Amino acid sequence: MDFHIDDTTRELSTLVRTMGEQLVTDDSLRELDARFGPGTEADGGRDHSTARFHARYWDELVRAGVPAALAPESLGGADLGVVGEALVLRELGRVLAPVPLSPAIRAAHLLDLVGGCDPDLAEGIATGRVIAAVADPDSPEVDWAPIAHAYLRPTPEGLIMPAEFDVERTIPVDFSCAGLVTCATVRAERLAEGAAEVDALRRRVHLAAYQWGVIEAALERTAAYASTRHQFGRPIGSFQAVAARLADGSIDVDAVRLSTLRAAFELDACNGEPGAPAHAAVASAHFWACDAGHRLAHTAVHVHGGVGLDRSEPAHRYFLAAKAGEFRLGGATRQLIDLGAVLAENGDPWEYSA
């Protein structure tokens, strides 16, 4: 499969990385932790002031047109595909950016498939001016629900979009913004057949891509620490046991990178009708994101030693983010079960692929 990335997508991901490195600093994340983080759990409901949300970075992403660039063309976007989305989500993961880009993308693509939708709402969500939360059918917890202006729940019967909804805030492993949503029964807007299935697969690719960025940056930071931390008069990175774990981590990051890109390319190629190749690719990407995420999270902590769990240092955030990603993805065993079911029913979907 050709993993060629076009210039527009490459420039967009570079822009997101540059902005993230400038704005989502360790100091800015420490400020968010002080508001809603370890030891300061709040029950603010839908109070934006207590949400772990990097408002400044989100405002800059919106101003730069990043959500719009990933929206469908019918809503004024560039529609860079799932590959473009994955590469941008990777950049968010690298800096642990707490911003609601994934639900903005998912909501825009869902609304693109709904006839007669409020055009102002669709345009607001596509550009990021209206924050959206999109439910996952496999989890009662909805990411970004506490600060969302709009709530969407895709189902096989259609898209549920209540005008009003209540949120009970939850406390995920990484202290991210999430909650349980309740709303009155409302009519479901008609969706194209298979749209809910595509959205579920898109969400899984987004999670894997974010996890890719998390473990990639965690490994880089850990390798840098191992080269400067001295023990017995030598950098600990020169010890064989430490060097071997870092080398294994590099292989794991590559596995997540390749499997995530494969899943994104397969989802783009299915034209809204995902078959065995797309399902197998997504399950494979999820397996690696869970398995590698688990290993890299523990490698980072072990190599950092006590510093890895010190809340005054940034390493612990990468540990929490990687573990949260593993849990949100459902764990490695679940992905192998999904992949096994695809193979048992369809055989090897890539047996004759180039």
Image: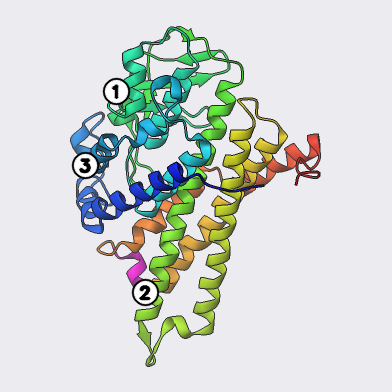
**Taking 69 as reference, is 114 above or below it?**
above
Q: Amino acid at mark 3?
A: Arg
Sequence-first disc among 3 and 1: 3
Tell me what residue is drawn at x 59 percent, y 57 percent. Answer: 255
In the picture, measured across the screen, residue 309 lies left or right of residue 352, that is: left
Mark number for residue 178? none
The magenta stretch is 306-310
User: Mark 3 to mark 2: distance in Å?
Assistant: 29 Å
> Could you say where residue 170 lies in the image, as x and y percent from the top left?
35, 36
Mark 3 — residue? 56
| Amino acid type, residue under disc 2 in the picture | Tyr
Relative image position of residue 321 (x, y in whole percent): 40, 52
Q: Position of residue 256 (x, y in %)?
A: 56, 54
Residue behind mark 1: 149
The residue to which callout 2 is attached is 225
**Marks 1 and 2, the one that precedes in the sequence:** 1
